[in-house]
């Protein structure tokens, strides 16, 4: 399968504190020559000041001053790098239990999750928590990096033990593709280059695995969904009568000549053209940003959705969802929030809380209904007008939403529609 050299892979890192996530990302950036000279100089200076013999690779990702002083990651740090084969965006997320919300934020758009396991400690509660969140967010690919293999004498037996530990609980998760790689981020074993210390490992190093991971099939190409973000009316001499509906294709494939429906009005039309700044296209698919023009003059505005006539989302004002509460303040019973779903904004409320999930044990707590920061719960949401939704497991774009506090404009929750 040929890899599109421009294809972007987003991945998130997760693991317990001091499992070496930041060091691993630093090693990826350092060994793949993806660091600017001024960054390298700054990190070398900081490393010397701290008394390190070599370069402290973790400093490449610890961007916040608090993080550098404490030596931990407390926010989601995004890093961009590229290789000749692929472009990457990394979300480096915190390991502490109180930063569950940060991991949800970093993982929400990821194609893959890297879960780090300390070879000395094996699978711990934090490992299970992060794997569970990756499963909840329907991340298609999970790479379990068994790190610090140098501290267990590069033992194949220890590596196999950890695989067994992980597989005992991962059978309950909804992850299609789980891979294991033994690494030493500090020494660079199996990160960018194959390890000479683990000749027993026949698989590819981490970077090679990321570069060759097939992600095109992760996108839903069946359910055509196009949320309209804005209407384009140039009014220029060249485009006097042009009316286009601009947005990003959420899923599916659109072509000129396709019979489409406009929701929520229900009017039908045919796609006249699909346009970009570089000219017209014969087809558009996720996640392309395009402008669609129709044969008929229909009143369409931001928040409407263009779909295929024979394949439509559910239009509803009430639905169940799993939400992660992101805010310091407790959720208020039947309080009004602004819900943002694709390009659609309207008022909503949490009508009911069924249960909260203990992400250490996966058990349900049906007694405590108060949503505190980092809680994950199953709820019913009621909106003022119908939303065009799909289940999150079928479509991560039309199946997700955020809730915003009307008075402070702060994002208080992220949700996945069931």
Image (tube, rainbow, N blue to C red):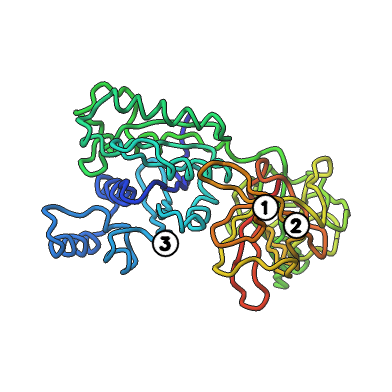
User: Residue 195: x percent and y percent?
Assistant: 23, 31
- Binning the other alpha carbons within 10 Å of mark 3 as few (below 14), some (14 to 19) or many (20 upward) gives many
SS at circle 2: strand
User: Taking 51 as reference, is 4 left or right?
Assistant: right
SS at circle 1: loop
User: Taking 191 as reference, is 54 left or right?
Assistant: left
User: Taking 2 as reference, is 206 left or right?
Assistant: left
Q: Earlier in the sequence, mark 2 or mark 1?
A: 2
Residue in front for this viewpoint, 222 or 337? 337
Residue in front for this viewpoint, 137 or 202? 137
Q: Residue at x 32, y 49 (%)?
A: 25
Q: Where, quadrant-wise, is the C terminus in this rendering?
A: top right
Residue 274 vertical position relative to residue 231 in the rendered view, above or below: above
Q: Residue at x 65, y 72 (%)?
A: 405
Q: Earlier in the sequence, mark 2 or mark 3?
A: 3
Q: Which mark lies nearer to you, 2 or 3?
A: 2
* Residues at circles 2 and 1 in contact by the CB criterion of under 8 Å: no
Among the 4 quarters of the image, the one containing residue 368: bottom right
Q: Earlier in the sequence, mark 1 or mark 3?
A: 3
Please give the residue where the numbered disc 3 appears in the rendered image.
75
């Amino acid at each position: 399968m040929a890899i599109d050299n421009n294809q972007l892979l987003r991945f998130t890192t997760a693991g317990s504190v001091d499992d070496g996530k930041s060091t691993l990302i630093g090693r990826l950036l350092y060994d793949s020559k993806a660091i600017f000279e001024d960054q390298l100089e700054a990190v070398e200076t900081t490393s010397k000041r701290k008394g390190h013999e070599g370069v402290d690779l973790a400093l490449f990702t610890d961007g916040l001053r608090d993080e550098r002083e404490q030596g931990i990651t407390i926010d989601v740090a995004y890093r961009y790098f590229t290789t000749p084969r692929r472009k990457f965006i990394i979300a480096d997320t915190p390991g502490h239990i109180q930063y569950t919300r940060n991991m949800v934020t970093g993982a929400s758009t990821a194609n893959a999750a890297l879960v780090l396991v300390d070879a000395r400690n094996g699978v711990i509660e934090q490992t299970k928590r992060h794997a569970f969140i990756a499963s909840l967010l329907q991340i298609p690919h999970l790479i379990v990096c068994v790190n610090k293999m140098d501290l267990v004498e590069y033992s194949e037996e220890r590596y196999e033990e950890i695989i067994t530990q992980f597989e005992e609980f991962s059978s309950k998760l909804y992850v299609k593709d789980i891979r294991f790689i033994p690494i030493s981020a500090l020494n660079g074993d199996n990160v960018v280059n194959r390890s000479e210390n683990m000749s027993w490992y026949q698989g590819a190093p981490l970077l090679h695995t990321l570069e060759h991971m097939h992600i095109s099939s992760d996108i839903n190409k069946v359910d055509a969904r196009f949320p309209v973000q804005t209407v384009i009316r140039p009014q220029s001499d060249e485009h006097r009568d042009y009316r286009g509906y601009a947005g990003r294709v959420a899923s599916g494939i659109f072509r000129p000549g396709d019979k489409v429906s406009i929701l929520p009005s229900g009017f039908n039309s045919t796609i006249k053209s699909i346009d970009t700044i570089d000219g017209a296209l014969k087809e558009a698919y996720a996640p392309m940003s395009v402008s669609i023009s129709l044969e008929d003059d229909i009143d369409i505005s931001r928040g409407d959705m263009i779909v295929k006539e024979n394949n439509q989302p559910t239009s509803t004002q009430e639905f169940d969802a799993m939400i992660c509460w992101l805010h310091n303040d407790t959720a208020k019973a039947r309080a009004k929030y602004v819900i943002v779903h694709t390009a659609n904004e309207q008022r909503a409320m949490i009508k009911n809380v069924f249960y909260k999930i203990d992400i250490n044990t996966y058990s349900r707590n049906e007694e405590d209904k108060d949503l505190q920061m980092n809680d994950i719960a199953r709820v019913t949401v009621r909106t003022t007008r119908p939303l065009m939704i799909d289940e999150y497991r079928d479509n991560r774009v039309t199946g997700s939403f955020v809730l915003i506090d009307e008075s402070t404009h702060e994002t208080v929750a992220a949700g996945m529609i069931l």
